[in-house]
Image: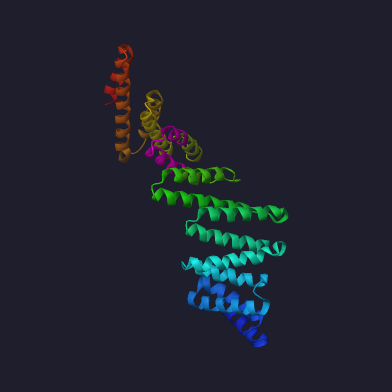
């Protein structure tokens, strides 16, 4: 491909001259290819030269220059030169907006590229706005609407996950959970929701719920997580039992012992089927189960309900 692109550029120079728009477009094509698969220094030289030729031959306000603008901006973005990339992407968008009917797919590409740049810069609201613009353009051309609409939605989801990760690293739990929740809600509207991705996101959220003391929210999310694991791996899987035990532990934090006990019993039953290498987990589960029985029995003793406490203490002793 490189050889053909190079030959095309030399042919354009020979036929039209160094400063003709055909030569500029050929330089732009070769530069774009080298930007992704070759020498970025040579790619920058070609793309910069292509932009100069196209602006000179077509005019700076001609949409025909937008491809060179976009390609050069992509190169700068990939090399971490964000401040140089941003104005070029913006110029490409402005030019492509002039003739949306002809350039709407190219306009979506530029919006997508600038949004990706803003995600790298942690400018999440700016990126969100651009992705929403791209979705609106797709809706204006329903006859050409295809999986790209879901592709843009996927990128919005990744934006919110990236935002959540960013705030999580800063220990800003409220903002992180809000971003993750938005991503989760968007996952639900997809034709084929990615259940493993949803489970991974819920797992992160529940850990943060517990860390921030939002136990009731954690209980709600653990129940959703258990339903997903039941669909994915079944109710006898280690993933399901792990979520069930985490839910039981959260119930204990809320002093909801009656809700926690059957969960611990179910988890112990599942873990008892595992190999010897997993017995320490079973021992841990049984120990926690016994402790809850004792705690519940003590609360009955404090209330003078000795007849209710004794069976629980006996069961705790038997488990231990």
Residue 112 falls left or right of residue 58: left
Residue range (magenta): 202-221
In percent of width and height, residue 137 lies at: 67, 55
In percent of width and height, residue 129 lies at: 58, 53
User: Image point 42% across, 36% down: which residue?
Assistant: 243
Residue 62, quarter of the rendered image: bottom right
Residue 74 sits above or below residue 291 on the image: below
- The count of marks equals 0
Q: Is residue 178 visible?
A: yes
Q: Is residue 39 visible?
A: no
Depth check: 284 or 135 in front?
Answer: 135
Residue 99, quarter of the rendered image: bottom right
Is residue 203 shown in magenta? yes
Residue 200 sits above or below residue 240 on the image: below
Depth check: 313 or 36 in front?
Answer: 36
**Which image quarter holds the C terminus?**
top left
Residue 262 sits above or below residue 173 on the image: above
User: Image point 47% across, 59% down: which residue?
Assistant: 121
**Which image quarter holds the N terminus?**
bottom right
In percent of width and height, residue 100 lies at: 70, 62
Residue 105 falls left or right of residue 167: right
In percent of width and height, residue 39 lies at: 49, 76
Residue 102 falls left or right of residue 303: right
Depth check: 150 or 117 in front?
Answer: 117
Q: Which colour scheme is used?
A: rainbow
User: Image point 57% across, 68% down: which residue?
Assistant: 88
Is residue 318 shown in magenta? no
Residue 182 falls left or right of residue 251: right
> Of helix, strand and loop, which mostly describes the magenta segment?
helix
User: Image point 47% across, 56% down: which residue?
Assistant: 122
């Amino acid at each position: 491909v490189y050889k053909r692109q190079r030959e095309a550029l030399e042919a354009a120079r020979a036929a039209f001259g160094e400063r003709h728009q055909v030569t500029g477009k050929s330089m732009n094509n070769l530069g774009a290819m080298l930007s992704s698969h070759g020498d970025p220094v040579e790619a920058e030289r070609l793309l910069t030269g292509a932009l100069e030729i196209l602006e000179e031959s077509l005019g700076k306000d001609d949409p025909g220059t937008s491809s060179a603008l976009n390609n050069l901006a992509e190169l700068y973005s990939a090399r971490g030169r964000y401040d140089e990339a941003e104005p070029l992407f913006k110029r490409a968008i402005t030019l492509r907006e002039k003739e949306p009917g002809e350039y709407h797919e190219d306009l979506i590409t530029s919006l997508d590229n600038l949004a990706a740049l803003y995600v790298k810069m942690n400018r999440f609201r700016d990126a969100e706005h651009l992705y929403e613009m791209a979705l609106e353009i797709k809706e204006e051309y329903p006859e050409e609407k295809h999986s790209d609409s879901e592709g843009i939605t996927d990128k919005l989801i990744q934006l919110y996950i990236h935002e959540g990760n960013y705030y999580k690293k800063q220990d800003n739990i409220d903002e992180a959970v809000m971003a993750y929740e938005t991503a989760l809600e968007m996952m639900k509207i997809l034709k084929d929701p990615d259940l493993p991705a949803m489970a991974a996101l819920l797992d992160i959220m529940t850990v943060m719920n517990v860390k921030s003391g939002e136990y009731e929210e954690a209980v709600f999310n653990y129940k959703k997580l258990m339903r997903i694991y039941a669909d994915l791996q079944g109710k006898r899987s280690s993933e399901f039992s792990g979520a069930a035990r985490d839910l039981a532990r959260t119930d204990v934090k809320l002093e909801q012992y009656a809700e926690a006990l059957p969960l611990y019993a179910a988890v112990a039953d599942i873990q008892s089927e595992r190999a010897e290498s997993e017995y320490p987990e079973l021992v841990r589960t049984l120990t926690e189960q016994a402790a809850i029985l004792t705690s519940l029995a003590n609360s009955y003793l404090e209330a003078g309900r000795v007849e209710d406490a004794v069976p629980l203490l006996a069961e705790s002793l038997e488990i231990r």
